[in-house]
Image (spheres, rainbow, N blue to C red):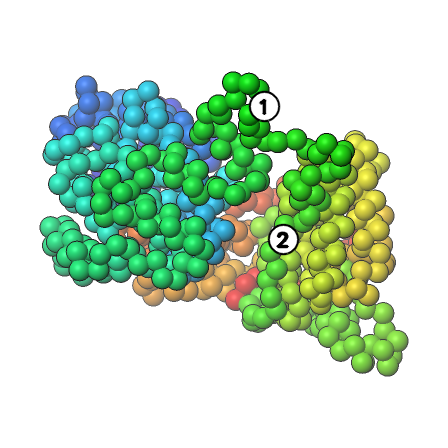
Amino acid sequence: MILKQGYIVDKRWHVVYLIKENPYAESYRVEDESGNPYFLKIYRLKNTPEKLIDDGIIREIEWSRTIKHKNIISAIDTARLKSEEDGDCQYLVANYFSGELLSEMLQREGKLDPKTATKIFTEMLEGLQYMHNMARPCLHNDITPTNVMLSSKTGGISELIDLGHASPCFMGTPPFDTADLDPRYASGQSFIGKYDERSDIFAATGVFYTMLTGRVPWDVEFTPDMTRKEKIKLVQKVRSQQGEIDVTGIEDEKLADIVKKGLALGYNERYSNVEKLILDLIEGDESDEAMELRSKLIAIDDEDGDDFNLFGDDFGSSGQPTSKQATETTADIDIKRGGGNGFADIAGMDELKEMLRKRVILILKDKELAEKYKLTPPNGMLLYGPPGCGKSFFAEKFAEETGFNFILVKASDLGSIYIHGSQGKIADLFKKAKENAPSVLCFDEFDAFVPNRSGDVGSNQAGEVNEFLTQLNNCSKRGIFVIATSNRPDKVDPAVLRTGRIDRQIYVPMPDATARKLMFELYLKGRPCEEIDSDVLAKKADGYVASDIAYVVNEAATIAAFNHENITQDLLCKTIEGIKPSINKDLLKEYEDMRNKMEGISRNNTLPHVGFK
């Protein structure tokens, strides 16, 4: 090992543990002085193949520190280091993989819905468009589902990772090691040493095909003992026998045509650049994001000033709102239809679940009983407490328990650039919830929707709060049950938290040992593991919330995947030791004080704890 655990690189990066190594490079998890995780990769120059070096600098390091784009992982720090045993070394530090690999999502989901797949594909292409149009154009050369990260730090925005094969366009012997490339996503031209924009586009479209269908291009499967030469031979044989890619199963005709062109076997039949592919992909999409992207990619021929207006006018000649403005008062929501395991997926909180069954679910589901006893159906509840404890998850499971439709709403879903636009969206949201009744309407981070009007709130936002108050009034009579979640209930306008609007306020505390044990079992389920003692893990993870435990398991799984090994008890324990819990004692005390204030009493934390089974 070049670096030992506990070693501090450049007085800044604290080495936590080794992730992966080969004869010339090693990868580590490191932390800064504040304990934030980062990824460090260090090369031994004396062992590094010459073809990976340009003018004395490791090519991956050079590209990583040059590239700065939201959809591509880039270097935060690069420098040289001299070791007595290993001689001259070069290293780079990048943001740690905080999130989920696309390959992991596909393994869990099988395939993605067209909207999600198109979003991820577009973000990948934006990253490629940047690389291909740099002052010194660069190819990625290794685009597969395992090299696309859906970063939790950026709210799920896709990032192309691993620039170990990045290079300029070339024809001939690859200036990088090809042994670990996946030929299923490689164009035929790359098998003869030709790498250019079209080869990157081919690979990216292959990933899009996998997202849409759940299958690798041409359904080629490899055996573990196959050499790269044998894999390429098999890919060529299958493509020759089957011909052009089969798009059966891709119902959207536009997307099917894009896949066929992006994966065309003929070199000249394929997209020649990323810009053309993106323009085809966002054709007909009039969202602000698509319009902004379109404006970056095409030059508008408008010499006379009125030939073509990409954005158009907000109002027609009659002074009435155009169709575009009308869409700004329409709530774009996804409705999850009733069904699922319900409370069976939640460990702990038995008292709360029983209370909800008796006082809420019974009345909501049994209308005859409610009418017989003249019971008023409850209107809604606020789930509050520390972040990461599963409040939104509980809301979804509540909907499953009732069999109601579930609608999750975030503040950005109701945003609008128009005056009163958000108020229109709020009204439309409740209208759609009524049309799909019975429904559970869940507002995530409720304080962002209805901030206290006694504070610094503008007139527009105050109007939005008023609209919420109107729509919340006895909405249960319209078949709508509201669940609001918040980490800061003290910021919510108090007029919302009264009977007839949000009837109940329920504190969701930190998970106890039993809940933590079940969380580890949940997150490890279906992953390649050796024998795991979840009781030990639960004890070591005292003070960790659900999101912390999910992060620990995903981190350990990432390390195991790098090394092609099973997840072990020792690896999980070491990962826990290297990750600090999200909630410290001071913050927890703040939430306990907040709870006492909300409940109007001083009490110990005696409510059952939430967890996931």
For the point 81% across and 68% down, which residue is it?
Answer: 377
Q: How many marks?
A: 2
Give residue 110's position: percent from left, percent from top: 40, 61
- Of circles 1 and 2, the one toward us is 1
Give residue 412's position: percent from left, percent from top: 64, 42
* Residue marked by disc 1: 306
Q: Is residue 598 left or right of residue 251?
A: right
Q: Secondary structure at mark 1?
A: loop
For the point 28% across and 34% down, which residue is it?
Answer: 197
Which mark is on residue 87?
none
Q: Is residue 39 left or right of residue 361?
A: left
* Residue marked by disc 2: 333
Quarter of the figure that contains the N terminus: top left
Q: Secondary structure at mark 2?
A: loop
Residue 324 visible from this viewpoint:
yes
Mark 1 residue type = Asp
Q: Is residue 372 above or below residue 545?
A: below
